[in-house]
Structures are given as C-alpha cells and as structure tokens.
Image (spheres, grey):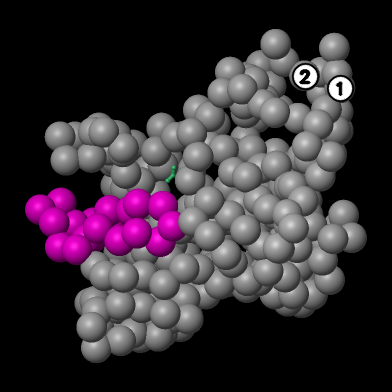
Amino acid sequence: MDNIKFYKYQATGNDFILIDNRSTKYSLSSKQIQKLCDRKFGIGADGLILIQDHDDYDFEMVYYNPDGSQSLCGNGSRCAVNFANHLGIVEKSTRFLAYDGEHQAEILENEEVRLKMANVQNVRLMADGMFIDTGSPHLVKYVINVKNYRVYDEGKEIRNGGLFKESGVNVNFVEVTGNSEIFARTYERGVENETLSCGTGVTAAAISANQKGLESPITVNTLGGTLAVEFKKHDDGSYSEVYLIGPAEKVFEGTIEMPA
Ligand SMILES: N[C@@H](CCC[C@H](N)C(=O)O)C(=O)O
C-alpha cells in the first residue's frame, strides 16, 4: 500500500489537504477523497487539492470537496498558491489553471494571497436572495444578527430545495456591519455543513453588498477571520477586476497510508 505525503493548509479557517501530484502518480477515487477528508477516520479537511503540472500554466489546481465533487475554491486557491511557492514552482506572482479557468495571484507580505477571480456576469434576484456565480454557485441572503443565525438548518434546506436540488448551491448569510464592512457565514455544498469561511462565498457576499450600496474594497469578516474583496462594477451589471485577498498558511505536514 502506498504512503501519500500531504500538507495541511488553512485560509481563514477553511482547511485543505494539499498533495504534490506533479508526477500524476495519484488518481484518487471519490471514496479515497472522502476518507482522507474525514475528520475521524482520515486527516480531516474541508477539501482536497492536487497540484499538477500544466504545459500552459505554472500549475493546475485540481480541487475536490470532501464528498469528492469538484468546483472552484477561493480559499483553496490561495492555499495552493502558497503551496506552489513552497514547492518552488512559483515566486511572488503566478498564473494557474483551476476548475473555472485561468487565475492570477500575487503573494503579499505575511503570506497573504491576492487572488484574481473570474469576472462576474450578473447578480440574479431570486425569492430567497441574490444568486451570484463566482466560479462556484452562491445564494446570498441578508439576515439580522448573523452571528446567532441558524445557518446550518436554513442553509441545508435551501441547498436541497426545489430550485437548486440538482446541482446544489452554497448558501451565504450576510449582515452589513459598517460602511464597507460585512459579516458572512456560509453553508457549503459538498461539505454539507457550515465552514468557518468560504472564499467564493465571501466574494459573492461582497458583490451582493455592492448592490446594497457598499463600495469596493469591502472588508468581509467570517467566523475564521477577515478577508478583503476588490472589484470594478460596469453599467451592464457585470463585475471585473475581482480580487479576493487574505491569509493562507501551512499548519502541518505528514504521510498517510493511501485508503482503499
Ligand atoms: N470553500 C470554497 C468553496 C468550495 C466549493 C464549494 N463547496 C462548491 O462546491 O461550490 C471556497 O473557499 O471558495
């Protein structure tokens, strides 16, 4: 049985297993990903990331939710950039490929990463809130007293509700807390629980706040820490130059036997 060398990273409390797969040695099944991400029987994480070689980019980030499904992960991307730096693949700036296409990123002081997100085409008003695609699908709902809100129960209900049943959605509960400041909590599909922070969710929350009159840059507080989001809004309702900025750090590294 193979031993896998892994690195554990966290970005505002959203935690990930990172694996150097430049040799493309590992092709993990959903069952293996589920076991590695399991907090009791495995390493435990909100997601798993393989860093792979790519002919046209510095690297490719292949992201899996803990249930084995795939999407873009904003916080995971910031961890991947610092990991790629640790592996010697990139220096201060990079261009890499992820689930939703090309991303650029810059490593700032104190290992903070400034990640360029894809343009946001529009904000769709729906019965439960605003629907915004930031590389993964997000519903943003404004609530009062978000710190005490029933995020798990309501998030689960909306995520599994009629409208989103097929492909699911991440559900963000947001409160405006200042002139350019919000607090966001996210129920993540694929984790099927609330996480301490969700990067694509924080980005969607900041863009939704602009619809309510808040201007870029917006500070987004989460249960796991603080991020900043910058953007440019256009007359047709789209957004470009969208950046997610915040910390990402290695927590520990180790080896684990490849699960069956
Ligand atoms: N934690 C992530 C989002 C990961 C993807 C999401 N669960 C989905 O399936 O859409 C982030 O930081 O963006």
- Which residue sits at x=47%, y=76%? 242
Q: Residue furthest bottom?
A: 235
Q: CA distance from mark 1 to mark 2?
A: 6 Å
Quarter occupied by the C terminus: top right
Location of residue 102 in the rendering, given as x and y in whole percent from the top left corner: 57, 64
The stretch of residues the image draws in magenta is 124-146
- Which residue sits at x=10%, y=53%? 127
Evaluate if marks 1 and 2 touch, with contact meaning CB atoms under 8 Å apart: yes
Location of residue 33 in the rendering, given as x and y in whole percent from the top left corner: 62, 26
Mark 2 or mark 1, which is nearer the start of the sequence? Answer: 1
Q: Quadrant of residue 74?
A: bottom right
Q: Nearer the viewer, residue 141 or 235?
A: 235
Q: Quadrant of residue 150?
A: top left
User: Does 129 appear in magenta?
Assistant: yes
Report which residue position mark 1 lands on. Answer: 3
Location of residue 205 in the rendering, given as x and y in whole percent from the top left corner: 35, 64
Residue 47 is left or right of residue 51, and the answer is left
Location of residue 218 in the rendering, given as x and y in whole percent from the top left corner: 43, 78
Q: Is mark 1 within 8 Å of ligand 1?
A: no
Secondary element under disc 2, as helix, strand or loop, is loop
The residue type indicated by label 1 comes to Asn
| Residue 95 seen | yes
User: Does 18 appear in magenta?
Assistant: no
Quarter occupied by the N terminus: top right
The residue type indicated by label 2 comes to Met
- Which residue sits at x=66%, y=42%? 49
Report which residue position mark 2 lands on. Answer: 258
Other-residue count near label 1 (Cα within 10 Å), few / some / many at <14 / 14–19 / ≥20? few
Q: Nearer the viewer, residue 62 or 245?
A: 62
Secondary element under disc 1, as helix, strand or loop, is strand
Q: Quadrant of residue 143?
A: bottom left
